[in-house]
Image (cartoon, rainbow, N blue to C red):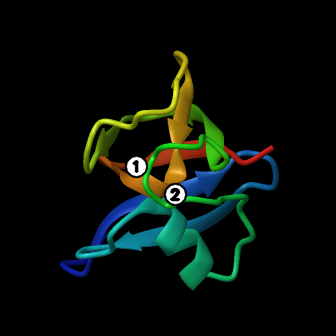
């Protein structure tokens, strides 16, 4: 990783890897910047539409989401990786 990269994101369903840049506001924003489609609606952690599976690694939430987040799930719109992660968007 470089000074401009804080983490590597691996998409488990196709093994694609992208870099999460320092200063990026969320995983959803990073995915969109890399032209990867991810479902979303509110971008605030209320609706849960951006729910994904965290295969490995850890994330930090910008603010605690109001939507229910089960073990092994994350909300892409309001979290950032805490180091390298692997996620499944399906």
Q: Residues within 10 Å of mark 2 (few under 14, many from 20)?
A: many
Q: Indicate left or right for 13 with 79 as reference.
A: right
Residue on which the image places disc 1: 84
**In-front residue for pair 83/35:** 35
Q: Indicate left or right for 16 with 21 as reference.
A: right
Residue furthest to the top:
71
Residue found 45% across the figure and 71% down from its top:
19
Mark 2 to mark 1: distance in Å?
6 Å
User: In which quadrant will I find the C terminus?
Assistant: top right
Residue found 71% across the figure and 62% down from its top:
38
Q: Residues within 10 Å of mark 1 (few under 14, many from 20)?
A: some
**In-front residue for pair 51/46:** 46
User: What number is the disc on residue 74?
Assistant: none
Q: Residue 54: where, in percent of width, then height?
A: 56, 34
Q: Residue 33: where, in percent of width, then height?
A: 55, 83
Q: Residue 10: where, in percent of width, then height?
A: 60, 54
Q: Indicate left or right for 82 with 38 as reference.
A: left
Label 1 sits on a secondary structure element that is loop
Mark 2 touches mark 1? (CB < 8 Å): yes
Residue on which the image places disc 2: 9
């Amino acid at each position: 990783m470089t000074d401009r990269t804080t983490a590597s994101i691996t998409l488990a369903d196709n093994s694609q890897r992208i870099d999460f840049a320092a200063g990026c506001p969320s995983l959803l924003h990073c995915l969109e910047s890399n032209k990867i489609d991810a479902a979303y609606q509110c971008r605030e952690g209320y609706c849960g539409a951006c729910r994904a599976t965290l295969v490995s690694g850890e994330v930090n939430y910008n603010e605690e989401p109001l939507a229910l987040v089960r073990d092994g799930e994350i909300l892409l719109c309001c979290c950032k990786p805490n180091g390298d992660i692997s996620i499944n968007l399906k």
